[in-house]
Image (spheres, rainbow, N blue to C red):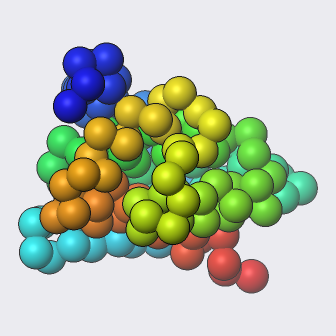
Amino acid sequence: MNSVYKTVLLDHFHNPRNKGDLDSMDRVKRGSNPRCGDDIEVGIRAENEILESVRFRGRGCSICLASASIMSECTIGLTMRQARHLVQQMLDWFGDTISEAPSNTTLAALGAVRQHPARKKCVLLAWVALDETLEIK
């Protein structure tokens, strides 16, 4: 794993952004991976289809929590449509449908995990939960 990417992932694990209380969120969805014990809730608050707040809480491995932190930072300020597009890009990237990371240097750090198939679910758990919050009408 590239040391720069490892540093980014460890920073997001040890200093998670937007982790905590979800009481003020408009929508919350839970993602769980019983195989490894990851259990994450993702909440959003939107105004005029723009994500004003994206937060998460839960427990999981370092990859899962770092990914949730990165996801929250990368999606605040996006429209709901843009966020869904970014989620799809992540799913395609980790599903090997596309080979290039979405154009964001922080997201590129997650690419270090792509070569470990067993860890892909750890990366995508929060992203899938976010996608589900964006589906609620």
Q: Residue at x 74, y 39 (%)?
A: 77
Identify the image quadrant of residue 135: bottom right
Q: How many marks can you see?
A: 0
Whether residue 94 is visible to the viewer of this picture, yes or no, is yes
Q: Residue at x 12, y 66 (%)?
A: 37
In the rendering, at what x and y percent does residue 114 appear? Answer: 31, 52
Q: Is residue 28 above or below residue 3?
A: below
In the rendering, at what x and y percent does residue 106 appear? Answer: 48, 30
Q: Residue at x 32, y 26 (%)?
A: 5
Residue ranking furthest to the left: 36
Residue ranking furthest to the front: 99
Identify the image quadrant of residue 6: top left
34 or 110, nearer to the observer? 110
Q: Residue at x 84, y 58 (%)?
A: 49
58 or 36, nearer to the observer? 36
Q: In the rendered image, which quarter contains the C terminus?
A: bottom right
75 or 101, nearer to the observer? 101
Q: Is residue 38 left or right of residue 96?
A: left
In the rendering, at what x and y percent does residue 34 appear? Answer: 14, 76
In the rendering, at what x and y percent does residue 12 appear? Answer: 33, 29
Q: Is residue 102 left or right of residue 97?
A: right
Q: In the rendered image, which quarter contains the N terminus?
A: top left
Whether residue 20 is visible to the viewer of this picture, yes or no, is no
Residue ranking furthest to the right: 48
Q: Is residue 106 left or right of residue 37?
A: right
Q: Is residue 93 left or right of residue 49?
A: left
131 or 25, nearer to the observer? 131
